[in-house]
Amino acid sequence: MRAWGLALVGLWLVAPAAAQMPEAARYEGWTWAARPLPTPLAADTLRRPSDHWLGRDKALHAAGSFLLTLSAQYVLTAKGGADEADALPFAAGTALFLGVMKEVADARHPRHPHFCWRDLTADALGVLLAAGVIAL
């Protein structure tokens, strides 16, 4: 558990620096809006790209949650000395919590706010797959 606490302290120290990055250095998830528009419409009037169930974004959400769950499980059991049965709910909960926080951040995006339940479903699928791997 001590390693987990050190990781949280590290995140706490790094997060303010990331929040103060200049706007040009931040990752812009909606790169299509940065292209020149063929018409004089503002970028805010465009519709969002379609959100498919079987798209690259959903695969990245599932893979990210899968890897987060496995990583947290490894850190808790191998480095933190926790029992596997006790570590799995905490590892899965951490990955799901981070997925929800990512969607909350997306919903607060100043230009294109979008909270996506499909992304959370993909996150849950990744966590379930990791739990299956851990249980084997």
Image: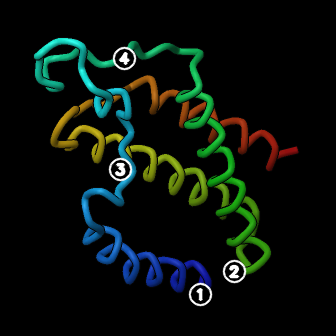
Q: Earlier in the sequence, mark 2 or mark 1?
A: 1
Mark 4 → mark 3, Cα distance in angstroms: 22 Å
Pointer 2 and pointer 1: residues touching (CB < 8 Å)? yes
Q: Pointer 2 and pointer 3: residues touching (CB < 8 Å)?
A: no
Lower position in the chain sequence, tag 4 or tag 3: 4
- Tell which of 33 and 58 is nearer to you: 33
Q: Is residue 10 left or right of residue 77?
A: left
Pick whichever of labels 2 and 3 is earlier in the sequence. Answer: 2
- According to the picture, the residue beneath numbered tag 1 turns out to be 2
- Residue 30, percent from left and from top: 35, 33
Label 3 belongs to which residue? 101
Please name the residue that numbered disc 4 is placed on.
Answer: 49
Q: Nearer the viewer, residue 92 or 20?
A: 20
Residue type indicated by callout 3:
Met
- The residue at the far right in this view is 136
Q: Are marks 4 and 2 in contact (CB under 8 Å)?
A: no
Q: Secondary structure at mark 1?
A: helix
Residue name at image x 61 percent, y 45 percent: 64
Q: Amino acid at mark 4?
A: Pro
Q: Amino acid at mark 1?
A: Arg
How far across and down, in percent of the image, does residue 58 sit?
Answer: 55, 27
> What is the CA distance from the residue labelled 4 to the residue labelled 2?
43 Å
Which mark is drawn over residue 80?
2
Q: Is residue 89 left or right of residue 67?
A: left
Nearest to viewer (mark 4 / mark 2)? 4
Q: Please tell me how crowded label 4 is: few (under 14), some (14-19), or many (20+) other residues with Cα within 10 Å.
A: few
Indicate which label's residue lies in the foreground, 1 or 4: 4
Chain-order first, disc 1 or disc 4:
1
Residue 34 image-quadrant placement: top left
